Image: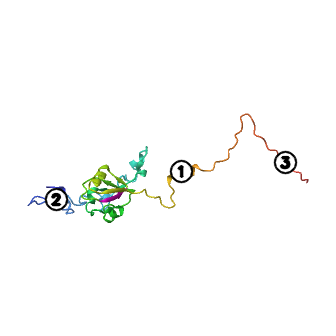
Amino acid sequence: MIRLHNLRPRPGARHRVKRLGSGESSGHGKTSGKGHKGQKARSGGSIRLGFEGGQMPLIRRLPKRGFNNAAFHKSYAIVNLDALNHFKAGTTVNEQLLRESNLIRGKFVGLKILGDGELKHGLTIEADKFSTSAREKIEKAGGSISLREARQPKEGVAEPEATAKAASKKPKRAATKKPVAGKKPPVKKKKKSTSKR
């Protein structure tokens, strides 16, 4: 079957190579198809996406509105069941084993197992999340699943609930008496000095 990666020219086909810089009468002389001088005419020269020559780019000119949840997004490492078939039956598959076998890499919050493919033998799989189909297929193959415990916060980093409780237990300020309407506050009398000059 012909795909993009195995396309070949027909046997006997000859494509004339475009010769650049062979004089101005060739049509590709002088600037050799690069246009006039400038950043885009240099080899290796490029302009980053969104750059507008120094003027304020459109993305910064437009007003920003609304809430973006990207800062609170949790990314999970995803592994499908068909990728676990090269482990031997009875193996306990966890994050460390998957990293050593290069099935997962990088930083992530947790591990999630999806049910794409079929599991050929029983495995004990430790992960943070399982899809419904993955859970059924693992149990059908004679394996078992175990949910990992929630990761403990690092030392020196307080849990959000603990910080909220601590904030609520702040010492209350002494209540100051508000002056009653119509009454003037009492004026303190100055003591007369008894020293004679």
Residue 13 lies in the magenta-colored region: no
Q: Which mark is residue 45?
A: none
**CA separation in Å, label 2 and label 1:** 61 Å
Q: Amino acid at mark 1?
A: Ala
The residue carrying mark 1 is 164
Q: Could you classify mark 3 by the number of other residues whose Cα lies within 10 Å: few (under 14), some (14-19), or many (20 or more)?
A: few
Residue range highlighted in magenta: 123-127
Give the image quarter of residue 146.
Answer: bottom left
Chain-order first, disc 1 or disc 3: 1
Report if residue 167 is visible in the image: yes
Q: Residue furthest bottom?
A: 100
Mark 2 is surrounded, within 10 Å at the Cα level, by few (under 14), some (14 to 19) or many (20 or more) other residues, namely few
Give residue 161's position: percent from left, percent from top: 51, 51
Q: Amino acid at mark 3?
A: Lys
- Quadrant of the frame with the N terminus: bottom left
Q: Main secondary structure of the magenta part?
A: strand
Q: Which residue is mark 3?
A: 191
**Dot 1 alpha-carbon crowd within 10 angstroms: few under 14, some 14 to 19, many 20 or more:** few
Residue in front for this viewpoint, 56 or 50:
50
The quarter of the rendered structure image containing the C terminus is: bottom right
Q: What label sits on residue 6 in the rendered view? A: 2
Q: Viewed as shown, does residue 72 lie left or right of 104?
A: right
Secondary element at image label 2: helix
User: In screen coordinates, is 53 left or right of 195?
Assistant: left
Asked if residue 105 is positioned above or below residue 170 in the image, the reply reads below
Image coords of residue 158 (percent x, y): 51, 56
What is the residue that sits farthest to the front in this orientation? 142
